Amino acid sequence: MAQPIRFLATAFATAFALAAHAQGDFLVPPANLVLDGVPPIPAEVAAKTAPYTAFKPGTLLDWHPKRREILVRMRHGNADQLHRVAEPGATPEPLTDHADAVSAGRYEPHAGNWLLFTRGTGGDEVYRIHRLDAENGQSTPVSPEGRRAGAPAWNRKGDRIVFTTVALDRFSDSREARTTLHLADPLAPEKARVLADLPGGGWSDFHFSPDDRRLAFIEYVSAEESHVWLMDVATAKRRRLTPSTKGAPVYYDKPQFAPDGKSLFVISDRGSEFRHVAVIDIASGRERALASNLKFDVENIAVSAPARRLAFVTNEAGAHELRLIDTVTRKETPRPALVPGVISGMRWRSDGSELAFTHATSRSPGDVFSYDLQEHRVTRWTNGNSPGLNAAAFPEPRVIRWKSFDGREITGLYYHPPSRFEGVRPVVVSVHGGPAAQARAGFIGRNNYLVNELGIALIYPNVRGSSGFGKTFLGLDNGRLREDSVKDLGALLDWIATQPGLDAGRVLVTGGSYGGYMALAASVRYADRIAGAVSVVGISNFVTFLERTETYRRDLRRVEYGDERDPAMREFLESISPLAHAAKIARPLFVVQGKNDPRVPWTESEQIVATLKRNGTPAWYLLANDEGHGFRKKANADFQFNATVEFIRRTLNP
């Protein structure tokens, strides 16, 4: 039987104060963290969670163009850095050592004597491209200072790159998003020239043709609509290759030239509920679907001319399958057998002999593997497991299903604690961001501690608006339908109440970004049905969010949420914002925010906490002055997790 929720606002504050003073030693937060209302966190919490924070996942970035070795991103010190892995199983050799994380890296594509990498500062996502000499470790800026650079794309000759930059609000008086496309020699970045000034902030995914004379790229409009463009590099003249959608949006992604340069392989959902591999004839614009019998979304593709193969990844119930197509016959070929998980970052070796990728599962934090086409052999390159834990014993998720308010079936991933935990178990519901993201059957990281050590049941719902379930489902939360996704959470609470092993009186909702909004919305709408909530970089007011998010992304967000400049929509957005109903929040709330967040400005968290204070409702508030859209530095992330564990422990009493 579910137990009643015990905490009222004043009792909650008193209990926290008494428990804090009753402990012995406490954690010292990193210097850049600001705590407001957060009690001292017992050091014993960190001692218990430490093995669960020691994982070092590896992310594939590139193959070396000459040698059978790879470039990966993994933690070194306090943040992710570039590493060289000389052979499978070799100890990763760090190539960078910065205070902030390196986000990406690619070798010069012929000799590999140097590489390009990108990084921002303090989580601001103001990425700048740098050239790194692999021998002496010296780095040189390539992209201009004070502008956010996109990922560089190499030409086939290996002497030029293209990259985009966008202005930042603090350096520009303009509130109109524009994207500048640059052509540069990374060895002489001062001679870079501007190819084009493009309207909006959604231009990305540039690829050179085999003869380096043309570029293919994407204009991203929303999670449901994008277009494929071509540009002549010499003249900068451009044309849209894909036709008008005529009111029925079509999504395109990952344009890559066929080896003969006469067609493009793309991801498309034209004429289909799901995203598939397609080939577009450049001369005529005719589009043809490949492997069209698959009723799953395709999420990534990678083409190799030497291998005559196109690798692609399908999303099948939240887990990925790696598949291959012969680019000549256009038929599927044998593929590797992999444990269900999440695949990302596919890269072909220059000779086409191997395909490398990152693979994460419920029992692996994310490691780099390669697949040899001739030998049909999978090789593991990195091992990011924590030495103090047996990850093979971690729980695997199962798919759960429930009916929502309108009869629509909603699904989620469910992790049940080990059998040694007896009685009905408390529940943490963790909502993904996006909104057009998806809970996947990958690695849940530190949250394994909640399941394995605290006996908490963990549920990751895929409410309406999530990707991976077709484009109809993806659009079910747009604009004025926003609160329908919150109702899906209410239906999940109903489902929890019917499960004999779960305690409907001890449920906590958490999430980051849009998931942070969902946690705040649940605190408002279901105040009498949840025990507490944790909002990480969450939206508290859609109007102030849209007005203050960086200009380069504002129009993209308006397509999803609605245009706050329209009076009727503005009134609606205000009416559904948690900030407008903060007086209804009566359960414990923990708010986490990065001061340099360009997506969800820190003021979103600041204003909800200030309002709760005025209302006399206690809340924990953790602000990082050196982080952005989520905590990336290990010391900060560890403290956040330990504080969250303490908050959950006191709120759910597991």
Image (tube, grey):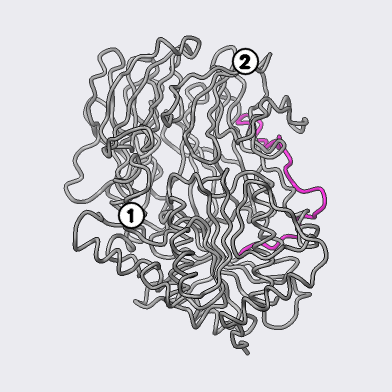
Q: Earlier in the sequence, mark 1 or mark 2?
A: 2
Q: Quadrant of residue 498?
A: bottom right
Please, what is the three-letter code of the amino acid marked with disc 2? Asp
| Residue 434 sits above or below residue 323 on the image | below
The crowd level at tag 2 (other Cα within 10 Å; few <14, some 14-19, many 20+) is some
Residue 133 is tagged as: 2
Locate the C terminus by quadrant: bottom right
Instruction: Read off the residue under disc 1.
Output: 273
**Percent x, y of residue 631:** 59, 48
Name the residue: 61% across, 58% down. 35
Please state if 22 lies on the left or on the right of 557 as rendered. Answer: right
Q: Nearer the viewer, residue 511 or 126?
A: 126
Name the residue: 40% across, 68% down. 578
The crowd level at tag 1 (other Cα within 10 Å; few <14, some 14-19, many 20+) is some
Q: Nearer the viewer, residue 299 or 594?
A: 594
Which numbered disc, 1 or 2, marks the residue closer to the eye? Answer: 2
Q: Which residues are magenta?
A: 370-397
| Residue 130 sits above or below residue 377 on the image | above
Residue 365 is tagged as: none
Instruction: Check the image and name the residue furthest to the front.
Output: 614
Callout 2: SS: strand
**Percent x, y of residue 351:** 57, 20
Residue 399 in view, yes or no:
no
